Amino acid sequence: MAGWSINKKIMKSFVTFRCANDFFYFPKDRPADQLTNRQTIRPTMIITDTQIFALQIPFKSQFSHHPAVQNTSESLLVALADDEGNTGYGECTPRLQITGETLEGTMAGLNMILDSWDGFELNTIHDVAWLLDGTEGLERAPSVRCALELALFDLLGKNTKQYVFDMMGELQTEMLYYTAVISGETPTVIESFARKAAADKVRQVKLKVGNDAKINHQNLVLIQEILGESVEIRVDANAAWTLDEAVEHIKGLAEAGVFHIEQPLSPGGREQWLVLKKRIASEVKICVDESVCTYEDAVWLATRQAVHGFNLKISKHGGLLPAFDVYEQAKENGLFCQLGCQEGETSILSAAGRTFAFLTGDMRSCEGSYGTLLLEEDLTAQPLQIGFQGIGSLSEIQRAYGLGVAVDLSFVDPYLVKIL
């Protein structure tokens, strides 16, 4: 066990050690097998049943971003049952353009792993971490790992009557302010989203942009007129530009007052970020999304100061623990982080994102928790979704033990297909 260190930024009550390409978190002053008092006095939890579901929920409105237009969600759910009648749920959102994963490949990976997990015994987060670390191939399958980790954490929380955030560390905040994301192919759609954001008095807005600089500028001016100067606006190019195009687009956006640009370049080729940073104005901040998926991506970009920030997403990193690894690299090297989400996440991934943001406490911005603002249905009677001013509170993930979501699959039954 090499590389012990106290993780002061993430979880002040935890000690971190490095082993086999993963960081694990343990209470600083107690043995690893004594995460909570309850966990040390109860019998071992035994997994008795596993299920996999594919989920496609229609969107209430079309979601446009480079290079795709989406009308439905696309995710996978994992359900794990224990010997006391509890069920834990996990979710992942495989995206070929981000992690190279497909829905079919992720299904196959989950099926293969879960087929060998019936009867497995767990008692602590320590057990979960070692189980996942010891499962071959998960380092190359972040979506598979994410769904499994969240389901295991959710089940363990329900089994021990705890919230996942309490099992993992010390809260750094109990209130989040979420971003409104504006996407659309016509000025009418853009205006509608902007007026909704203005009515809700959100503090931050992200505008999806593309290759046409004129249209980008028109959309930006439109939402600036509606929202006023008090709302921070950033843009997301979703890897739409070449290096030379990015320099020109960013120059125009900076002149219009936008200084936070997300993923202007394609994920291929890390050296391009060093070149771009040298060619743009110093006040412009570049945040990467598709280019920072793995721990190795984070180390390379952060140690070279190739960008200014990381957009962290629970599914693309492989769950909460790997997301903390990436976060730690950013903070050690002076980069900011924001919480992102995949379009169409249900309340399960939204709850995981909130858990992460409450434990870190310093996300520059937060996305997600859109619930039935975007989806026709969510898998709970009380979907996690942002409120007035984009507020997301801790109390909303205290509605059930585990991740905090009281899952009821009957709400999404028409859109659910059982795989295993």
Image (cartoon, helix red, strand yellow):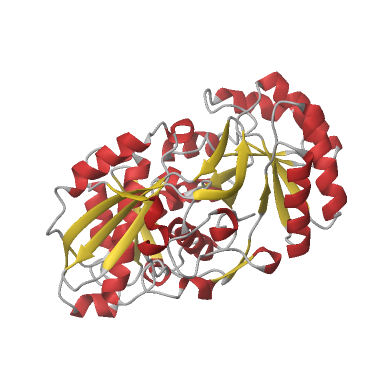
Residue at x-position 61% and y-position 32%: 66
For this view, does 377 lie left or right of residue 409?
right
For the question of whether residue 357 can be seen, the reply is yes
- Classify 202 as above or below 75: below
Picture coordinates of residue 143 (x, y %)? 37, 43
- From the viewer's side, name the closer residue of 330 and 88: 88
Closest to the observer: 75 or 96?
75
Which residue is pictured at 15% across the width and 69% down the height?
83
Instruction: Count the numbered circles shown.
Output: 0
Q: Is residue 21 left or right of residue 131?
A: right
Q: Position of residue 327 (x, y in %)?
A: 50, 50
Q: Where residue 350 sits: x, y (%)? A: 49, 58
Which residue is at a point 17% across and 62% down the rendered structure image?
A: 47
393 on left or right of 129:
right
Could one spot residue 9 in this view of the protein? no
User: What is the x, y in percent for residue 297?
Assistant: 47, 35
Q: Residue furthest front?
A: 414
Please say if 157 is above or below 136. below
Rendered view: 416 above or below 13: above
**Is residue 321 found left or right of 81 in the rendered image?**
right
